[in-house]
Amino acid sequence: MSAHLSYGRVNLNILREAARKELREFLDKCAGSKAIVWDEYLTGPFGLIAQYSLLKEHEVEKMFTLKGGRLPAADVKNIIFFVRPRLELMDIIAENVISEDKMHSPRDFHILFVPRRSMLCEQRLKEQGVLGSFINIDEYILDLIPYDGDLLSMESEGAFRECYLESDQTSLYHTAKGLMTLQALYGTIPQIFGKGECARHVANMMLRMKREFAGSQTQILPVFDSLLLLDRNIDLLTPLATQLTYEGLIDEVYGITNGYAKLPPEKFAAQKKQGEVGKDLPTEPKKMQLNSAEELYAEIRDKNFNAIGAALSKKAKIISAAFEERHNAKTVGEIKQFVSQLPHMQAARSSLANHTSIAELIKDITSEKNSLYSFSFHVQLTTLHSSFIYLFYLYLTRQVTSEAFFDNLTVEQEFMTGVDTDKVNTYIEDCIAQKDPLIKILRLVCMQSVCNNGLKQKILDYYKREILQTYGYEHMLTLNNLEKTGLLKPQTSTRNNYPTIRKTLKLWMEDANEQNPNDISYVYSGYAPLSIRLTQVLARPGWRSIEEVLKMLPGPHFEERQQLPAGLHKKRQQGENRTTLVFFLGGVTYAEVAALRFLSQMEDGGTEYIIATTKLINGTSWIKSLMDRPEAP
Amino acid sequence: MAFITANWNPLGEAFYRKIELYEMGWSLRDGLKECLVAAAPYGGPIALLRQPQRPSSSARPQLEIYSSSGANMASFPWKSGPVRQLGWTVCDDLLCIQEDGTVLIYDLFGAFKRHFSMGNEVVQNQVLEAKVFHSPYGTGVAIVTGASRFTLATNIDDLKLRRLPEVPGLQGAPSCWAVLTQDRQTKVLLANRADLYILDNTSCTPVTPPGLSLQSCSIVNMAVSFSYKYLALFTDSGHLWMGSANLKDKLSEVDTKVRTPPKQMVWCRRPKSQQPSVVIMWDRLLLVAGECTDTIQYTLDEESVCVAELDGVRIVGGSRHELLQEVPSACQDIFKIASMAPGALLLEAHKEYEKSSQKADEYLREIKEQSVLGEAVRQCVEAAGYEHEPETQKTLLRAASFGKCFLSNYPPEPFVSMCRDLKVLNSVREYTVGIPLTHTQYKQMTVQVLIDRLVYRKLYPLAIEICRYLKTPEYQGVSRVLKHWACCKVQQKEEPDESIAHAVSVKLGEAAGISYSEIAARAYECGRTELAIKLLEFEPRSGEQVPLLLKMKRSQLALSKAIESGDTDLVYTVVTYLKNEMNRGDFFMTLRNQPVALSLYRQFCKHQEQDTLKDLFNQDDDHQELGNFYVKASYKEKKLEARLSLLQSAVDEYNKAKNEFAAKATEEEMKLLRFQRRLDEEMGEALLGLSLQETLHALLTSNFHKQAEQLYRDFRVPDKSDLEGAAEAAIERRSEGEISTVLSRCSPTTDRALLERLNRARSTAAKK
């Protein structure tokens, strides 16, 4: 279930195990049968820590979703509320507790606050007169959740909005606490680098907390050599661009939440057993877990989508060859060996089928619909050869991308290369006129603004007016939010420093090689994410070489050292790589993750990266989190 | 070395020894006569309540506290009511149980701490007898009242009085009684003449000890062992019964031939005891009775008190303080005359070696031939731990060290840690410190507790020395001692705040894990608020500062500390506190100076108190946000008029904020809403709430060209050029999307024929 977490450079399973242990301990504190009442928001993140089976082992018999009114009947001794410390949730809990049938066999109430207990909430419960009804009030410190072998996420959706729009630094406090937990398990991180206001704030809190815990720290040889804290708002551009890695595109098109993607079911229909192919296509979306536990996925997730075809076909060949082996198996021993490999091969085959389906789904969106391609080919389960031919055909012929997708990409790339960013863009105008999804428009307009270091007042007003007139006046508030966060802004100085940044950091690479990448720019087919360039430069040759550019980006940049207890200084072997934890405050995209993985794998890179973030985002989910929709009565 | 066994007395297979710990430093004229005495186990302090020399109405008894070596720590006249019993808590606090059931608690230096009562009914009936006992739950007190009722408090720090059931037939005090802790329950065992009862929370059960032969005799004394596992009963026929405390097994019965009821009786055992015994004390006689029915008799030349210990009995007298214990087997093996145990041989070998005699080699050979050198070293190390005399310890350790040289791979830890332990023990046994701990007791009580004990005695430098010497983690060691020192320091009333704060900060410095807030809390308790605030400044954990600051009503400071900590929950807590405490104006002003708190409070208001949010924006003259606020509010209104008036307010605010765009856009929205309503009313359309483009589109598709035209003019929708060309192209391509684009660009001035063609083309395209 969690083996893939242990294979990385840093064994993140330790963190998961620590979290599980704590959960078990809490559950055992409430002796007897129990029912959990969930704050719905928490179920996703908890799924990454523990499955239902673990809860069941500890006598959890029922699970409910937290909602007002009376709690559902359940013959259990304990009712445990798993909630975030939010006042509105406290009111619901109070309602639950008050309307509990006293005559019925009494049930014990407990609260588990995630990730931290809050005096404010307890005060609210007290005001509601129910605080005394709880036997246990505890906290479950769940800040950083292991998301994959090299990836940690706090799964905190609102972090960017809270930090940059509402100046609520709660999530930064949790970040600092999470990093302290991490250091308790993996040793003190000797060096901290950072760029941005929030990064500075987190580093300050970490240093302060270290002083507070002074004397009680554990003697662990540091696993991480350095920590890099990056504010999302130093690089607003990257998330706005369409990700072009396989995983990134799945996220862009279908969205990946808590490690799961919901895919349209039609393409997976044929995977049912041959015999029962009926007319009834499944209507429920297919939920697929996407992580490095799946061998094939780990191999292809970070490739540019244009290289997926080749990768899949190569894989198909290998698998088909492996199945052909059976003809060569002559002796009983050989047959036995073949049979023993069968489960693995079958898993690989079904994995391949799944990803071929997903790739095809995405292709449908990114390529022009053409009757030639839309024939169903799910028979490949039984006839691998035909699928191979299909793939060969599909990918070795010239790629035809759909006009909409292609046009959008072209405009994005124009902006990123600085073409006509100071004029009203006709493509955006047309999209508004066609009433394309608002988020798409906002992504493009924001991108233009960011690439031009703000838009001329006249142009900005024009876009805003167009948006309000087409999509409705209610988006006034959203536009205001975007302006507040700096995603959209009027040009204040005449100087546009984006070209300087682009040139110095080589953000645009003309000859991005999508098939065999030699630079991180492959993840956006030409654009190298600014955040990752900063990371790359920090590792070699160091930030001193780009002082000028750093000054152009918002917020301070800094370096801090944390004293290690004597005897814990790591003696690095020759050629041993450094391990850096890169923390994106306010979210990171899958494409950025892919770029960091690419850097980790570079032969002469010298640094391996573990990635942590408040939330995995893409342009759509990001902009959505910043939107304000006034509710009609 | 023969003299070592000089004070050994055989008891069955084992030996008992009585060693002198101290010559008492006190000068008591009448010894312990006419004194109420309480001596704490683990070499703890001794309290005496001495009756006045000449009883008169004005004379007061004197309460005195001494260390185990008789050094005076406190002495003051007793001014409260008559005291029945003295006792010590596990934290070295003195309990004085008065006749009226009040229990007064003093610290080691005689400073009054607090008091509590053993119940109201006691005031009338009075306490006849009382006992202080220790259990895993802490220190407890048990009393029996004039009404022959027992009351128990298991833990005086978490006082829960339990009145035990009545004992049938009991009048006045029982002949003797004891407190037992069994199965996590505290019970009272009592004897009323020949009858024995166990009293627990709910019942009083008569019990009979197995094999107590003389039923007719009454039980006059009883003793429970240190571990509550064993029980000894003494009958008026002079018989001593020994058995398990659960009264299931009998160990032995001894006839002491003394019929007088003893003054005191205590168990004398040690872990892995070969021959456990009971020590019985009469006026002039001390008798040690073992399981084997043997006895040892000592004459007592002065009034004494026995103190039960984990591994023996201490005998405190007017001039001497002695330890009576079974000789541990390691010591027996080594020092027993003519012993051939490995340890004894090794000691002999080393002795010869010191004399540069070749016999050393012979002894060594003998040990090595039996390959028991490891065992020999182990014995010497262990025995060193049991010896009180540093010289003997050294001799044994040297022998062990000598033996170690001939062993490869012998683990060094036991030897090294024994050396360390002994160094610590010798330093606390020192006369001036006066804590006569044995090695066994020390291991049981742990270094942490020993440090605590030293701290209670204000022996800070020694405590720190020991922490440093044992390399105790700062957090548990030095820092803890320094904290206690500082807590004590802040109580020095004569020193000014400045110099105390300075002294504390200099001494504590950056010591790890110091909780300045605890020290500050202590200062505040003593009424030194200013000092407390000064001390809080040194606290690195802002979170810890906040509650105390709030308590001291320094809410402004609390707010800035909360902000410093970064813990938003803490900020919220202070903010809610401030909100309830201050008037609104001051509250807002306070927030205004603390942007972090202000934005958090705004968040709070956004979800909880919309009106306050408006006030906040108003106060800050934040017109932009006020505008937004009105816009948001307008969507909550059902009635159009109310909605329009809110939007008008928004326009005003946007104008004040000099946000022309927003003002204009809002005005246009109002105009559009009015227009939509008119059309809805006139034509029965449902346009209200649509965007401008949607409205235009709806009008055009419903063939309200005139109205569309007006709208187009009113709102000066930008003209799109080359419409016709685009239209033609779109129709030709039969692309629905494209046609829609063109349609949306159409204005009322567009040729109707073209519009219709476009509409037709779109529907055909859509069907496809």
Image (tube, grey):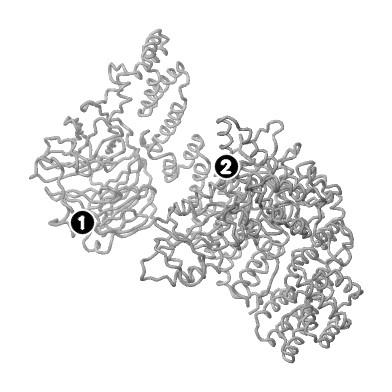
Residue A483 higher or lower than B441, as above or below: below
Residue A49 higher or lower than B327, as above or below: below
Q: CA distance from mark 2 to mark 1?
A: 68 Å
Observer-side mark, 2 or 1, equals 2
Which of the 4 image quarters holds residue A497? Answer: bottom right
Residue B468, image x, y percentages: 51, 36
Q: Which mark is residue A487?
A: none
Mark 2 falls within which chain?
Answer: A
Q: Is residue B244 visible?
A: yes
* Residue of label 2: A343
Which of the 4 image quarters holds residue B313? Answer: top left
Apparent side of residue B79 relative to residue A153 in the rendered image (left or right): left
Residue B677, image x, y percentages: 73, 88
Q: Amino acid at mark 1?
A: Ser
> Which residue of the protein is positioned furthest toward the left in this rendering?
B216
Between residues A216 and A546, which one lies in front from this camera angle?
A546
> Which residue of the protein is positioned furthest toward the bottom in this rendering?
B682
Q: Amino acid at mark 2?
A: Pro
**The C terminus of chain A appears in which quarter of the rendering?**
bottom right
Residue A525, image x, y percentages: 80, 51
> Which residue of the protein is positioned furthest toward the top in this rendering?
B358
Q: Is residue B511 visible?
A: no
Residue B258 higher or lower than B663, as above or below: above
